[in-house]
Image: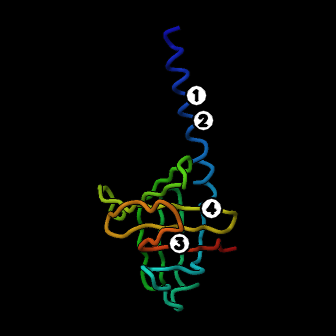
Amino acid sequence: MRYHGLLVGAVVLLLGAAPASDDLKKLQGTWSLVKGEKGSKGIPDDDVGRLKFVFKDNTITVQDGKRDEAAEFKIDPAKKPKQIDIFPDKGAKAEVLGIYELDGDNLKISWNKGGGTRPPDFKTLSDIVLVLKRDK
């Protein structure tokens, strides 16, 4: 009887981790920028197709053809909308609070720069909204 609470807690923990694990698996791979907005302006045309986002385990690497920038991330797909937290500097507490939407080979990510608040949805103007497509 005294192990019942421990067992229930372990089951809840395992079941709660499953959706994050599923989305984490689906994110793995290389994604190309299809379109985006920075503030109220569109992302420059020369960035479209050139910028790559590589998800490997819990690391996202942005490649622009000249340099790579890596950051750790964590997701919470149980939230509505789904949440992504990006940690630009290893071990840093400052994080980028964002949301994401994953639909097959299409990924949309939105966040506010400078440690701002998390966007409540994709309709509200955020600092950055990116639409990515999985590379084949």
Tag 3: residue type?
Phe
Tag 4 residue? 102
Question: Do residues under tags 4 and 3 come within 8 Å of each other at their CB atoms?
Answer: no
The residue mark sitting in front, 1 or 4, is: 4
Residue at 60% of width from left, 80% of height from top? 34
Mark 2 touches mark 3? (CB < 8 Å): no
Q: Is residue 111 left or right of residue 21?
A: left
Task: Kindly identify which residue carries mark 1.
Answer: 11
Residue 134, given in percent of the width and then of the height, sits at: 65, 71
- Spot occupied by residue 73 in the image (x, y as percentages of width and height): 45, 58
The reply to whether the C-beta atoms of the residues labelled 1 and 3 are less than 8 Å apart is: no
* Disc 2/disc 4 C-alpha distance (Å): 20 Å
Residue type at tag 1: Val
Q: Earlier in the sequence, mark 4 or mark 3?
A: 3
Question: How many numbered badges does the structure rendering display?
Answer: 4
> Which is more N-terminal, label 3 or label 1?
1
Placement of the C terminus among the 4 image quadrants: bottom right
Query: Which of the numbered marks, if any, corresponds to residue 80?
Result: none
Q: CA distance from mark 4 to mark 3?
A: 14 Å
Q: Which mark is residue 53?
A: 3
Compared with 7, 90 (above or below) is below
Q: Which residue is depicted at the point 60% across and 67% down?
A: 107
> Can you name the residue that lies furthest to the bottom here?
46
Label whose residue precedes the other's in the sequence (1 or 4) = 1
State the residue position of label 2.
Answer: 15
Q: Are marks 1 and 2 in contact (CB under 8 Å)?
A: yes
